[in-house]
């Protein structure tokens, strides 16, 4: 089996974060990304027809690297909040957002208006997403052995 490179880990994390499904070819390491039609049934998938056909024709050669569940995404947001000092007003705003209805929307609104912390959030989330990819990939490898 072909291991993932750091560049592939980063690419998978980015694509998963954008809502794509990711498939890894266990023989040659090729990656395929296709839209998640279960979450976006009205999406036009014509641009990905080659990838979808390749996946259909060689389905057993590919393993899917799962997307995060909502609870996993929520946990990443909560983990980020814990990195902030108690004296930081942003921490209280984010805690409040996470404890209200529509926590994802509230968190996004607060973080988008947080100046320098917006980029810190993206960096933190990216790091956590890459760890997620590595963990899912290791599960796949362990199941294949």
Image (cartoon, grey):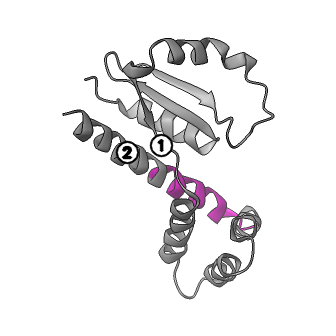
Of residues 57 and 30, the one drawn nearer to the viewer in this rendering: 57
In this rendering, would 95 be left or right of 1? right
Vertical arrangement, residue 98 with respect to residue 11, above or below: below
Mark 1 and mark 2 in contact? Answer it, CB < 8 Å. yes
In this rendering, would 55 be left or right of 46? left
In this rendering, would 102 be left or right of 134? right
> Tag 1, which secondary structure?
loop
| Position in image of residue 108 (x %, y %) | 72, 63
Q: Please state the extent of the stretch shown in magenta in the rendering.
A: 113-127
Q: Quadrant of residue 95?
A: bottom right
Vertical arrangement, residue 2 with respect to residue 145, above or below: above
Residue 101 belongs to the span the image colors magenta = no
To which residue does mark 2 refer?
Answer: 136
Principal SS element in the magenta part? Answer: helix
Q: Residue at x 49, y 70 (%)?
A: 79
> Badge 1: few (under 14), some or many (20 or more) residues near its Cα, within 10 Å?
some
Vertical arrangement, residue 129 with respect to residue 8, above or below: below
To which residue does mark 1 refer?
Answer: 66
| Position in image of residue 3 (x %, y %) | 29, 28
Q: Residue at x 77, y 66 (%)?
A: 109
> Tag 2, which secondary structure?
helix
Give the numbered dot on residue 139: none
Q: Residue at x 51, y 67 (%)?
A: 75
Q: Quadrant of the N terminus?
A: top left
Q: Residue at x 41, y 44 (%)?
A: 133
| Position in image of residue 30 (x %, y %) | 42, 19
| Position in image of residue 50 (x %, y %) | 62, 11
Q: Quadrant of residue 69?
A: bottom right
């Amino acid at each position: 089996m072909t291991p993932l490179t750091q560049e592939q880990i980063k690419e998978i994390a980015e694509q998963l974060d954008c809502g794509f499904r990711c498939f890894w070819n266990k023989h040659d390491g090729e990656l395929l990304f296709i839209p998640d039609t279960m979450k976006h049934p009205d999406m036009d998938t014509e641009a990905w027809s080659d990838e979808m056909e390749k996946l259909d024709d060689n389905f057993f050669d590919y393993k899917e690297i799962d997307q995060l569940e909502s609870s996993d995404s929520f946990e990443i947001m909560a983990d980020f909040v814990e990195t902030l000092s108690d004296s930081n007003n942003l921490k209280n705003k984010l805690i409040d957002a996470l404890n209200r209805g529509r926590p994802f929307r509230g968190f996004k609104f607060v973080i988008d208006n947080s100046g320098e912390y917006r980029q810190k959030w993206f960096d933190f989330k990216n790091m956590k997403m890459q760890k997620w990819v590595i963990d899912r990939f290791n599960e796949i490898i362990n199941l294949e052995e």
